Image: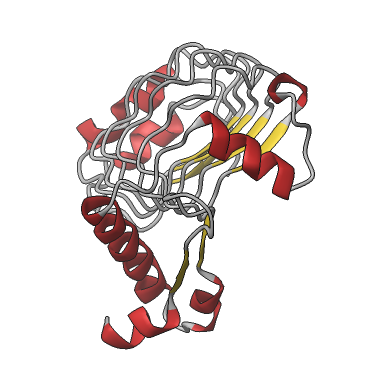
């Protein structure tokens, strides 16, 4: 990791204690994708544990909107890019009621929470975080695409409430047994499913997939 640390440049804000972004562009030069994954998780966990710099405050959210040339009035935005920011918690999104697509890839998030106001959301990108449980998605009744790859999910659960969910990407997690994925039988709307790079070796997994009526082979 020592060489990787030299490649990662953490950009701190010039005014105030909070950084506006973490620059992970250097990771594009890392040829091994697993090194990229672990390096990102390492740097965000280290930063979150060592500092209180990564709160998703209302001010930081508006600053990001300004930087990205989005609307300053939160509810007017239908897309929000919060990836590669080093946030360790989801919060202060209640004013962004018009969001249809939310990018949260590559942060230090440990829990899915505080999304109750985002009832128009269609796409939610949570890959490359530190999440260990699928939860608190019930208000997102229009969600049709969820990416939660590269986390620490051990069980697929709490998705049957999402009646129009079509795409579920849950590769590179901690799924192991048929019991870990049997909840998929309660999610008939799913047509695109990525379970790759888990530890699912039981042949009975095929029975679960065959029971999903809309799954595209």
| Image quadrant assignment for residue 44 | bottom left
Residue beneath the point at 47% across and 84% down:
31
> In screen coordinates, is 204 left or right of 192?
left
Between residue 134 and residue 193, name the one nearer to us: 134
Asked whether the viewer can see residue 178, the reply is yes
Image x and y of residue 69, in percent: 79, 45
> In screen coordinates, is 118 left or right of 75?
left
> In screen coordinates, is 139 left or right of 2?
right
Q: If the image is split into quadrants, where does the C terminus sit? A: top right
Residue extending farthest to the bottom is 3
Image x and y of residue 6, in percent: 38, 84
Colour theme: secondary structure
Image x and y of residue 130, in percent: 30, 47
Asked whether the viewer can see residue 215, the reply is no
Between residue 110 and residue 68, name the one nearer to us: 68
Residue beneath the point at 22% across and 47% down:
202
Image x and y of residue 104, in percent: 51, 43
5 is higher (above) or lower (below) than 197: below
8 is higher (above) or lower (below) than 96: below
Q: If the image is split into quadrants, where does the N terminus sit? A: bottom left
> In screen coordinates, is 58 left or right of 34?
right
| Image quadrant assignment for residue 157 | top left
């Amino acid at each position: 990791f020592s060489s990787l640390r030299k490649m990662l440049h953490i950009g701190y804000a010039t005014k105030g204690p909070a950084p506006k972004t973490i620059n992970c562009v250097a990771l594009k030069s890392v040829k091994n994708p697993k090194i990229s994954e672990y390096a990102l998780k390492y740097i965000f966990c280290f930063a979150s544990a060592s500092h209180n710099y990564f709160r998703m405050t209302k001010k930081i959210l508006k600053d990001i909107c300004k930087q990205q040339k989005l609307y300053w009035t939160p509810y007017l935005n239908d897309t929000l890019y919060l990836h590669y920011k080093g946030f360790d918690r989801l919060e202060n999104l209640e004013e962004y009621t018009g969001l249809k697509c939310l990018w949260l890839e590559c942060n230090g998030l440990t829990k899915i929470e505080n999304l109750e106001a985002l009832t128009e959301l269609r796409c939610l990108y949570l890959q490359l975080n530190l999440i260990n449980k699928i939860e608190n998605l019930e208000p997102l009744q229009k969600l049709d695409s969820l990416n939660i790859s590269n986390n620490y999910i051990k069980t697929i659960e709490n998705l049957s409430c999402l009646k129009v969910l079509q795409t579920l990407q849950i590769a590179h997690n901690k799924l192991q047994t048929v019991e870990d994925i049997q909840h998929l039988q309660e999610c008939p709307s799913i047509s695109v499913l990525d379970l790759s790079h888990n530890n699912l070796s039981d042949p009975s997994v095929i029975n679960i997939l065959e029971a999903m009526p809309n799954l595209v082979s």
